[in-house]
Amino acid sequence: METALLLSALVLGIGSGFHCIGMCGPIAMSMGLTRKQAANYHLQNLTYNFGRIVTYSLLGAVLGIVGEGFQVAGLQQYLTIAVGVVLIMMALFSFGSKDFASRIPFLSSALLSVKKNLARLLQKADYRSRFATGILNGFLPCGMVYMALTASLAAGGIWQGALFMAIFGLGTFPFMFMVVLLGNLMTTAFRIKILKVIPVMMLVLGGLFILRGLELGIPLISPKKEALQVIHNSSEAHQHGDHSTCH
């Protein structure tokens, strides 16, 4: 996968970190972790965050399959442009709202169901429950996650989509890990300011995807189709090489 895509996933994850603290921080802080046993405390925190990243990766793999279908059909360029347009539409839909996902009725119903299951898991203190909490947390309706998933469509394959979302999840990890350690240090006013910046990020990312799809010959940002094909072929060759060494 292109370095530019991997970097965009990481930057998107880091940029989403403050949003994650506001949206998912209360869940993390409700786990009742205490510092009485430091090792256990940190391991449970890691287990919870690992569950989130696993969910993101699985969702990215599913979207990657769709993206691969477009690539096989020779429509990857149009898909990339469409992803950019959708991201821009998401951004415009987000202005003046806490999170655009909250405006979609069926997602609100899904959120209620997930919250009920989370409430039961939060009462338990074993590693399995922490991991399951992270898994469910990853399914919570969140505009930033949907933005990343939309972008993962352009990754072009199941493993590429999974990797894109895993890197996105790793970008959010420091923020979600620290919120458990330090508590919710952000004021409501600061969180609102961060939420206002997010649509701007979505606009920029959408524009970058449109430029990428136009194949204008700009290195890293909008490479020609031939350059993209070389990257894809070298990636496939590397994967086949890894498989051959296993036999």
Image (cartoon, rainbow, N blue to C red):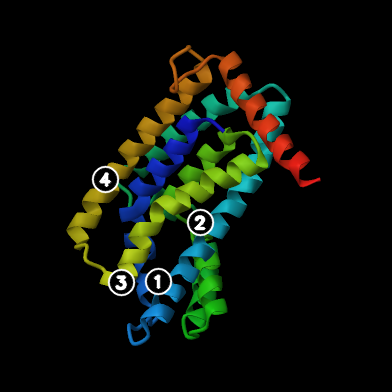
At x 58% / y 35%, what residue is drawn? 155
Crowd tier of the residue under label 4, counting other residues whose Cα lies within 10 Å: few below 14, some 14–19, many 20 or above? some
Crowd tier of the residue under label 1, counting other residues whose Cα lies within 10 Å: few below 14, some 14–19, many 20 or above? some
Q: Which residue is mark 1?
A: 27
Compared to residue 134, the image places residue 9 above or below, namely above
Compared to residue 164, the image places residue 212 above or below, namely above
Spatial CA distance of label 3 from label 2 is 34 Å
Q: Is tag 3's residue or tag 4's residue first in the polypeptide sequence?
A: 3
Q: Amino acid at mark 3?
A: Leu
Q: Is tag 4's residue or tag 1's residue first in the polypeptide sequence?
A: 1
Furthest-top residue in view? 217
Spatial CA distance of label 3 from label 4 is 26 Å
Q: Amino acid at mark 1?
A: Ile
At x 26% / y 70%, what residue is drawn? 182
Left or right, 8 with reference to 54: left
Say which of marks 3 and 4 sits in front.
Answer: 3
Q: Which residue is mark 3?
A: 181
Q: Which residue is mark 2?
A: 105
Q: How many marks?
A: 4
Is residue 143 visible from the viewing direction of this image? no
Q: Is tag 4's residue or tag 2's residue first in the polypeptide sequence?
A: 2
Q: Is tag 1's residue or tag 2's residue first in the polypeptide sequence?
A: 1
Say which of marks 1 and 3 sits in front.
Answer: 3
Say which of marks 1 and 2 sits in front.
Answer: 1
Q: Which mark is residue 141?
A: none
At x 58% / y 16%, what residue is drawn? 225
Spatial CA distance of label 4 from label 1 is 22 Å
Left or right, 162 with reference to 91: right
Q: Which residue is mark 4?
A: 196
